[in-house]
Amino acid sequence: MQKVERQQHKDRGRKRLTGLLLCVVLLAAGITAGILLRNRASEEPEPVRKHITGAVTARSAEELKSLTVTQRGKDPWTAVREEDGSLRLQPEDEREPNTWIVDSSIAGRLVDAAVNLTYEDIFTENRSDWEPDAEDFGLKDPLVKAVFRYTDGTEITARFGGSADPDDNAYYYMTIDGDDRLYAVAAGTVEDLNTGRELLHPVHMLEIRGALLDRITVRNGDGTVRTEWELQGQVSDRDAAENWLLKIPFTYPADYDAMKNLRDSAENLRLGIYIGNAEGETLKQCGLDEPAAVIELHMAAGSTGTVSDLGVYDVTDWPERTETLILGGKKSEMVDYVRFGDEIYTISRFSVSIFTDTDPQATVARYTVATPLNSLESVMVEKPEGTVHYALVRTEDADEAEQSGTGDTSKYRCMRNGKEISYDAFDAAWERLLTVTVSGRLPAGSEKKETHTKYTLRTVSGGTHTIELSDYDGMHDAVTLDGHTCFYLIKGGMTELP
């Protein structure tokens, strides 16, 4: 017979086990609830700190007398506001007697920062909260220190430190002398004031008009011509883009795409930072006492037009002129010194290398025919078996059809030896002829033999181009374009016209 107490002991053990399990379950549930609550809390947005914006000063531009800017690690510069609203940079020392007007776009931003100095937030009202850690805020050696002086005799000194939000650098720390507060200031204000003296000088804008270019010359430092391209005809000719000629170091028609690239590059030339006047020691330091090269861009007199924002077509007349860039030494791996007029600037080496480093031979025409159909008036083909003359006749509304790009060939007619043939057939044949390229370059000293086939092209602008074929060897003909012989073509390479 079992003892009761033993049975009772067994029941007590079960009760303890059950209680223990219940505690474990409750503990697990508590932990889970805590995790869920913590996760939910982390998903809730943190309270957004309300920004306290305001102005340190709000004045009119006329109230600014001068400003002095000191960039970290650089000497300060001072600019004084003139009566006409411009800023005149003051000389660094007595050795620099000349002063000059600050670039107008930069001056506008500097004046605005000086008379409308605003802040985006106030981090603290107490100097003791930030001054011990001034170095951490970038304020022990400020990124920029600016002193603004006004006509009423007051003065504000602002110091700008490091970024207040390193993730996107939208705001910077700022302090004002005589003010205990630590401010947040917009990055734009700091960027406007963080301007080096060398950037303040107005930079001359090169007025290169590709449509008016008619000669591009590259000279060596001693003045001798290294390479020269020249337009044959007038810049106003309809087919002017196809009529460039390489003149030096040898003479041959230039490639359309190569010349377009040169003209576009000329239009995109930009001067960089102003270095100083082109005189004395500055010339020598910049390698301009013995120039590396000279680029001359000659433009004919003419007109160019642009469409304004209002949709009005504005025409500008330009006189004949030549822009000259004298290249000096290297400022860095990507930047050279350049003299323009009486001033020295920097310039991107990449932008000028297309003129100085391009192999002239790479710019000559590899196509035997360069005149597009819409520039062609007639073509005469002379062969031993006879001569064929093709004339293209345009109706009054042909130009309108060309400009609209409708491809309506009914506006044109083609005459072969006085008899009309299919214009579409001639169009297709001419397109094939435009794709014919030379096979190779003739050896130096090769002499041209008697011409056996000659094409004479007359253009709508009144120009004339000739293509002559003469025997070179059993497989090839020498090609002479406009009287210049440089390449050969496989025999039969010129496709037939209808």
Image: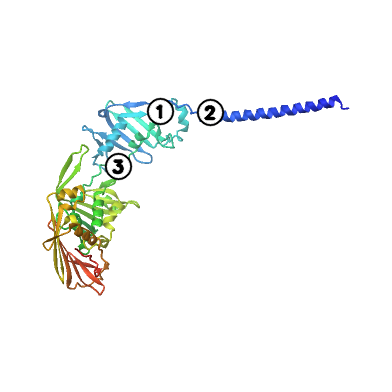
Q: Residues within 10 Å of mark 3 (few under 14, many from 20)?
A: some
Q: Would residue 18 appear left or right of 114 to someone viewing this image?
A: right
Q: What x and y, as percent, mark residue 142?
A: 40, 36
Along the polypeptide, which appears first: circle 1 or circle 3?
1
CA distance for labels 1 and 2: 28 Å
Residue that label 1 marks? 121
Q: Secondary structure at mark 3?
A: helix
Q: Tag 2, which secondary structure?
A: helix
Instruction: Determine the residue positioned at 23% across, 45% down.
Output: 205
Q: Amino acid at mark 3?
A: Leu
Q: Horizontal placement of 49 versus 115: left or right?
A: right
Residue 108: x %, y % from top left:
27, 34
Which residue is at 20% across, 41% downward?
A: 307
Does residue 310 lie above or below 266 as drawn? above
For discs 1 and 3, the disc positioned in front in the rendered view: 1
Alpha-carbon distance for marks 1 and 3?
30 Å
| Residue 287 visible to the viewer | no
Mark 3 lies on residue = 199
> Left or right: where does residue 430 sit relative to residue 179?
left
Closer-to-camera residue (285/245): 245
The amino acid type found where label 2 is placed reads Ala
Q: Picture quarter containing residue 144?
A: top left
For mark 2, does the 10 Å Cα neighbourhood hold few (<14), some (14 to 19), or many (20 or more) residues? few
Q: Which residue is mark 2?
A: 41
**Drawn side of residue 126 relative to residue 157, left or right:** right
Q: How is the image coloured?
A: rainbow
